[in-house]
Amino acid sequence: MFSLLFGAGLVVLNLVTSARSQKTEPLSGSGDQLLFHGADRSDFSIMIPPAGTECFWQFARQTGYFYFSYEVQRTLGMSHDRHVAATAHTPQGFLIDSSQSVRGQINFSTKETGFYQLCLKNQQNHFGSVQVYLNFGVFYEGPEMDHKQKNERKQLNDTLDAIEESTRKVQNNIFHMWRYYNFARMRKMADFFLLQSNYNYVNWWSTAQSLVIILSGLLQLYFLKRLFNVPKTTDTKKPRC
């Protein structure tokens, strides 16, 4: 019995010690609150209703570089204005930058830790929806470390430092290649929807013109036939002079 109580005490002590030793990063102005900041990169498409607004939040640390790019892929409805308004706000709610175009970018260095707000407004279209492709996130040029980790790193071998530096450069280059790839994806989807819209427009317009040509030919044939329609003459029914 004593051994079971002793083992349970050790388990509780380990849990308390591990909970105290967790490294947490509080949100600006929120004390020691734990954070769930999710992924550092996101890319997806969203449909914004007429005169609607959609907002998203992305977590970033103080020493990061934030990027936000968007492109309107297509419009649905009566209005065909592809311009949208994009804004970026700090965790405290202050405006960082804004953009109003068919496609645009908002890039800035993060000055504080927290959730940055990104908003898109379809304010130009009151009778049409727009589909927008989004690509946003945050990246960090170098690893974050405290003073103790820096002192430990000085004791490492120069070869390992060189390998680590090369690996970090390769990772940064791969990340920027991924960003350019997303730009190409945005343009590709926008071009695809434009080609599809033109294809449907040409097909419907060609079908309508074909129907008009066939209908006009039938009407011409009908009226020409009536011009040569001679009534039959009989002894009781003869044409008058």
Image: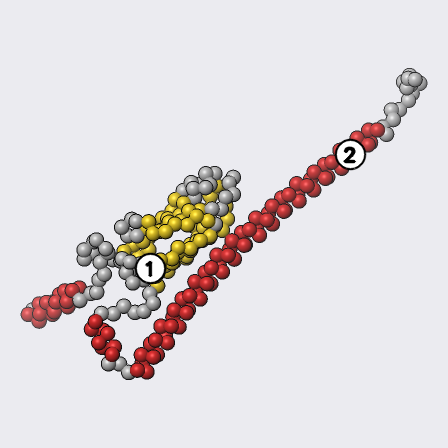
Look at mark 2 in the image and give the residue it sits on: 220
Going by the image, does 66 lie left or right of 22? right
Of labels 1 and 2, the one closer to you = 1
Q: Is residue 25 above or below residue 99?
A: below
SS label for mark 1: strand
Is any atom of residue 198 visible in this view?
A: yes
Res. 46 mark? none
| Residue at x-position 44% and y-position 53% | 104
Say whether residue 202 is left or right of residue 78.
right
Q: Residue furthest left?
A: 2
Name the kind of residue labelled 1 in the image. Ser
Query: Looking at the rendered structure, which numbered label has been put on residue 109?
Result: 1
Q: Is residue 78 above or below residue 182?
A: above
**Residue at position x 38%, y 72% from top?**
169
Q: Is residue 77 above or below residue 199?
A: above
Q: Report the quarter where the C terminus lies.
A: top right
